[in-house]
Image: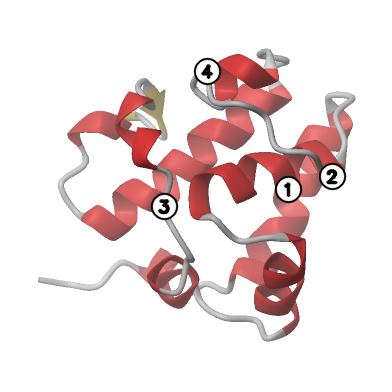
């Protein structure tokens, strides 16, 4: 099976695009970081470290401290695919992150984006 090119992209190259997207819609980098932290378990220092070291997305998710146990509650369409139906686990994790960023940019309430979880202080 062919490896997807997105797996080799660095998180550092995608992160600024996420920042632009949410800021363009009136949201903050802190809110973006909160969403990514909720999904992956990285803290602020860990997030900065993976950005600075330019790890690829495969490594980013492989080294994630703890994927949130509520990721299965993330549903919907991203890039024309239902995230809950994506078979490749890594691609699904990437699309979960895309979906959460889209929800933030669209102005969805943080409690809803975090699937009802308590919102950690950022």
The image quadrant of residue 61 is bottom left
Dot 3 crowding, Cα within 10 Å, few <14, some 14–19, many 20+: some
- Outermost residue toward the left in this view: 1
Local SS, label 1: helix
- According to the picture, the residue beneath numbered tag 3 turns out to be 67
- According to the picture, the residue beneath numbered tag 1 turns out to be 33
Q: Nearer the viewer, mark 3 or mark 1?
A: 3
Give the mark, 2 or 4, whose residue is nearer the N terminus: 2
> What is the CA distance from the residue labelled 3 to the residue labelled 4?
16 Å
Residue at x 84% of width, y 44% of height = 29
Taking the image as shown, residue 29 lies to the left or right of residue 75, namely right
Give the mark, 3 or 4, whose residue is nearer the N terminus: 3
Q: Nearer the viewer, mark 4 or mark 1?
A: 4
Task: Evaluate if marks 2 and 3 touch, with contact meaning CB atoms under 8 Å apart.
Answer: no
Task: Evaluate if marks 4 and 1 touch, with contact meaning CB atoms under 8 Å apart.
Answer: no
Residue at x 17% of width, y 72% of height = 2
Local SS, label 2: helix
Taking the image as shown, residue 84 lies to the left or right of residue 122, namely left
Residue at x 57% of width, y 23% of height = 113
Taking the image as shown, residue 88 lies to the left or right of residue 23, namely left
Residue at x 71% of width, y 26% of height = 105
Dot 4 crowding, Cα within 10 Å, few <14, some 14–19, many 20+: few
The image quadrant of residue 53 is bottom right
From the viewer's side, name the closer residue of 119 and 30.
119
> What is the CA distance from the residue labelled 2 to the residue labelled 3?
20 Å
- According to the picture, the residue beneath numbered tag 2 turns out to be 29
Q: Quadrant of the N terminus?
A: bottom left
> What is the CA distance from the residue labelled 2 to the residue labelled 1?
6 Å
């Amino acid at each position: 099976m062919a490896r997807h090119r997105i797996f080799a992209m660095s998180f550092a190259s995608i992160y600024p695009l996420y920042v632009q997207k949410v800021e363009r819609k009136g949201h903050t980098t802190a809110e973006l970081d909160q969403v990514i932290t909720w999904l992956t378990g990285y803290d602020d220092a860990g997030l900065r470290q993976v950005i600075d070291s330019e790890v690829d997305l495969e490594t980013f998710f492989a080294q994630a401290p703890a994927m949130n146990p509520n990721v299965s509650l993330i549903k919907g369409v991203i890039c024309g695919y239902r995230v809950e139906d994506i078979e490749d686990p890594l691609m699904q994790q990437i699309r979960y992150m895309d979906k959460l960023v889209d929800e933030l940019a669209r102005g969805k309430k943080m409690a809803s984006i975090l699937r009802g979880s308590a919102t950690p202080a950022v």
